[in-house]
Image (spheres, rainbow, N blue to C red):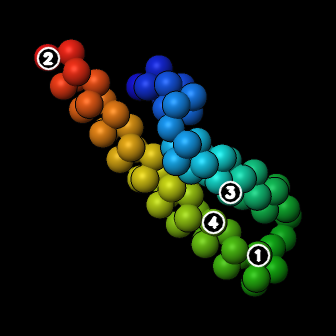
Amino acid sequence: MLASNQQLLASDEQFRKLAQEHSQYEARLGFLIDKRYLTEDEKLEEVRLKKLKLRLKDQMQSIERQYKLQSQQNIA
């Protein structure tokens, strides 16, 4: 799994953009989680970021499944 992620990061522009966006959301979430108290807006942002991160992860996994399927078909 890790090898295919590395290959996709190197070769697939869409996967690379999704991974970069996922990392940005992760960093912002880390900042919010480290805060002692969150404002109501920050609480909403935290929920929104978590949903966005999940959506990106799903998209990345879909690309990875397609990549693996293509790799298997090329071997056969």
Distance of mark 2 from mark 3, alpha carbons?
Answer: 39 Å
Image location of residue 22, percent across then percent down = 62, 51
Vertical relation: 19 (above or below) 51: above
Can residue 24 be seen here? yes
**Callout 4: SS:** helix
Q: Are marks 4 and 3 in contact (CB under 8 Å)?
A: yes
Return the residue at label 3: 25
Residue in the foreground of this view, choosing between 75 and 32:
75
User: Mark 4 or 1 closer to N-term?
Assistant: 1
Q: Residue at x 48, y 50 (%)?
A: 57
User: Mark 2 or 3 closer to N-term?
Assistant: 3
Image location of residue 2, percent across then percent down = 48, 24
Image location of residue 68, percent across then percent down = 30, 30
User: Mark 4 or 3 closer to N-term?
Assistant: 3
Q: Amino acid at mark 3?
A: Tyr
Vertical relation: 2 (above or below) 62: above
Distance of mark 2 from mark 4, alpha carbons?
Answer: 41 Å
Q: Are marks 3 and 1 in contact (CB under 8 Å)?
A: no
Q: Amino acid at mark 1?
A: Glu
In the image, taking residue 34 as reference, residue 12 lies left or right, namely left
Vertical relation: 10 (above or below) 16: above
